[in-house]
Amino acid sequence: MATAINLLSDEQNRHLSETYRRAVGQKNRQLLLGLVIVILMLVLSAVGAEVDGAKFIKNFWRFPHYFYEMAPKLAWATFFPDLAEWFWGLSKWLRLLGETLLIAYLGTVTGALAAFFLGFLASRNLAIGSVSHTVAKRFLEFCRTVPDIVFALIFVVSFGLGPLPGVLAIAIHTTGALGKLFSEVIENIDMKPVDGLKATGATWRQQVRFAAVPQVLSNFASYSLLRFEINVRGASVMGFVGAGGIGQTLLEYIRKFYYSDVSAVLILMIATVMIIDYGTEKVRHRLVDVEGSR
Amino acid sequence: MNASLPTTSREKRFPELDTVKHRHPQAFRPNVKRRATTIGVGVILVGLYIFGLSTLGFEPERLADGFKNFIWIVGLMLPPNPGTVNIALVFLKGLVETLSMAFLGTICAAILALPFGFLAARNIVKNPVLHLLARRFLDIIRGIDTLIWALIWIGVVGLGPFAGVLAIITSDFGAFGKLFSEAIEAADDKPVEGVVSTGATRFEAIRFGIVPQILPIIVSQLLYFFESNTRSATIIGIVGAGGIGLYLTETIRTLEWKQTSFIIILVLVTVAVIDWVSGKLRTALIGARPV
């Protein structure tokens, strides 16, 4: 069957292509302008960050060389003795790794508990009063903006060296980070159960307990697990400032150029992080399923 | 009076309760397995917490002493004061270094990671071995913290902000690569099929079928990483890789608390400004929709 195609007149065609060209031209001009600005800022920041291309090219060989030095000297004939020598400090490193994980765990749980309470105060829909709402919000903002390692630096001075300042630093930073996420979760809940409870004369605490908490708990757990992953990474460098964990040992090895020890510790750290990531991902998927089945 | 007469309001409203209970017994039985799991997980979590408290040296006296010291230090921090104008200028220079490191690091990392993201995406690279290798490679890079990369790069280009830039590029390369590849995998296939059906080459299919879909995600992630890199660039100086972190560590080590608090406030204000600007940019570039 023949189909008639509507041919536009030249006049209409010209008008349309003109409009199209103008629209695209404006977009391209904007893009070009943005690109020029970005490149300008890149050049400025290269100056600010003392980027030295010549030095980079001259010294770049040291980067692969570093990994070459780090690679273990394993021979096939003496594979297991070599492996044992490479991981000579395994029991000590595993103990330190365990300490690192504990620091991350304590920091995450403490921070999550604090964030649980502050999250309700900082949420828009379940805040008690405008003063506590603002104070909680600002406090959370402060906690999350100051990096945990800065808190650790200060706590090391006031609490002394060791894992304790590390835990406190991670806990405070976690409070800030999770508190914001928690309050956003709370702001997105269905308010009908809350209204229903309010209508029966429930107090604020009862409203939170029976209407809000069941809706948010699995999300809270999921975010806390995600935060735990981040905190494991954070705890592994806490030792750089003397706040416990494996970081101090690693820093020592890097500074003293004990290449094979650096690679052994790094491998253990990466493996731990991967296992933790994998495990928490599994648990989070199950939590999502629980959420979905309700 | 009949003994089986309904007595409670529930029975009055639902007289068939017993029949239903009989027909669906499992719905009325307490879920023992689930309850046991909940209690078991709770006990393990609390037990681990208490174990941690006891092994990591949480003694009440030590905590009390530490808090006393901390309050005292906070008292010493007030009011924030850099000392002289010259010192303030030095701190500002550190701040400029920090921002430069963050900006340069984020952009370079994104540019380097984009092609790698395509390599690690399952729908672009069909070879499972290549795809798996790319993914694991990115995982390993991400598994090493920025501070550790900074230490390694200091060995290559020496102390200073350049090492910090390289550290940020390296660690963000891993994160960007993963995010980009996930965004590419999540992209809708239909536009690609449409472009291919017009006789486009493979490159054109990616350019016009996939890139427009992932561009908003990339822009949003770029802004987000710039924000978070401003924060990591403030601490990267702790190991000697430039920026304001160097001065922060120095003032804490020399117990110049008024300068410390000045630097912290400087950082807080900068981060707040950057958050605000990037929020505005995000809405201007990709609209208010969440990505």
Image: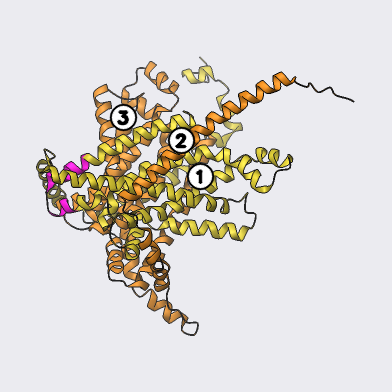
Chain colours: A orange, B yellow
**Residue shown at the point (34%, 55%) measured from the top left:** A51
Which is in the foreground here, disc 1 or disc 3?
3
Residue drawn at point x = 53 percent, y = 29 percent: A26
Along the line of sight, the residue nearer the viewer: A241 or A292: A241
Element assignment for label 1: helix
Residue highlighted by disc 2: A33
State the SS at label 2. helix
Q: Residue A286 carries which label?
A: 1
Magenta span covers which residues? B250-265
| Alpha carbons under labels 1 and 3: distance apart | 28 Å
Residue in front for this viewpoint, A26 or A126: A26
Return the chain for callout 2.
A
Task: Please indicate, yes or no, whether residue A17 appears anywhere in the rendered image.
Answer: yes
Residue B103 screen position, x and y as percent: 37, 45
Question: How many labels, in total?
Answer: 3
Can residue B46 be spotted in the picture? no
Q: Mark 1 or mark 3: which comes first in sequence?
A: 3
Q: In this view, does A90 lie above or below B100?
A: below
Q: Rate crowding at label 2 as few (under 14), some (14 to 19) or many (20 or more) other CA atoms within 10 Å.
A: few
Tell if the residue under mark 2 belongs to the same chain as the one under mark 1. Answer: yes
Q: Do labels 2 and 3 share a chain?
A: yes
Q: Please tell me whether mark 3 sits on a helix, a strand or a loop.
A: helix
Residue in the foreground of this view, choosing between A240 and B264: B264
The mark nearer the N terminus, 2 or 3, is 2
Q: What's the CA distance linking mark 2 and mark 1?
A: 47 Å
Inspect the image, locate mark 1, and give the three-letter code of the amino acid beneath it.
Arg
